[in-house]
Image: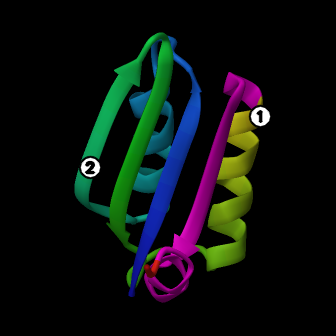
Amino acid sequence: MRAIITVIGTDRVGIIAGVSTILSESNVNILDITQTIMQGFFTMIMVVDVSKSGINFEQLAGKLSAKGDDMGLKIKIQHEDLFKSMHRI
């Protein structure tokens, strides 16, 4: 099962490391990643495989959200199907 993670906030050191550490500890594989900084704002989208995760989806979402709160970011994870449905033209 794949999911989409979005990260938005003011750029600072350690954002990718913070998110990647949670994913690694949860046995979540990063399949694709893109990030950019636009006028001081950090944006990142990740496609991840959660099929072998050691925790359930809600727990993972909670960990990512808490990391976002700690770092002053908005971090969200959505199932790929839901993400596709919400962003269909």
Mark 2 vs 1, N-terminal side: 2
Q: Say which quadrant the C terminus sits in.
A: bottom left
**Residue nearer the viewer, 24 or 33:** 33
Q: Position of residue 21 (x, y in %)?
A: 45, 41
Q: Residue at x 22, y 57 (%)?
A: 32
The image's mark for residue 69 is 1
Going by the image, does 23 lie left or right of 69? left
SS category of the residue bearing label 1: helix
Q: Amino acid at mark 1?
A: Asp
**Residue nearer the viewer, 15 or 81:** 81
Q: Position of residue 11 (x, y in %)?
A: 51, 15
Q: Amino acid at mark 2?
A: Ile
- Circle 2 crowding by C-alpha within 10 Å: few under 14, some 14–19, many from 20: few
Which residue position is annotated with label 2? 33
Q: Residue at x 57, y 72 (%)?
A: 78
| Residue 12 belongs to magenta span | no
SS category of the residue bearing label 2: strand
**Vertical arrangement, residue 69 with respect to residue 41, above or below:** below
Q: Image quarter for residue 73?
A: top right
Q: Position of residue 45 (x, y in %)?
A: 39, 50
- Circle 1 crowding by C-alpha within 10 Å: few under 14, some 14–19, many from 20: few
Q: Residue at x 67, y 40 (%)?
A: 74
Q: Residue at x 47, y 88 (%)?
A: 81
Q: Image quarter for residue 52?
A: bottom left
**Vertical arrangement, residue 82 with respect to residue 12, above or below:** below
Q: Position of residue 72 (x, y in %)?
A: 72, 24
Numbered circles on residues, count? 2
Q: Magenta part of the protein: which range? A: 70-87
Going by the image, does 77 lie left or right of 70? left
**Vertical arrangement, residue 37 with respect to residue 52, above or below:** above
What is the CA distance from the residue labelled 2 to the residue labelled 1?
21 Å
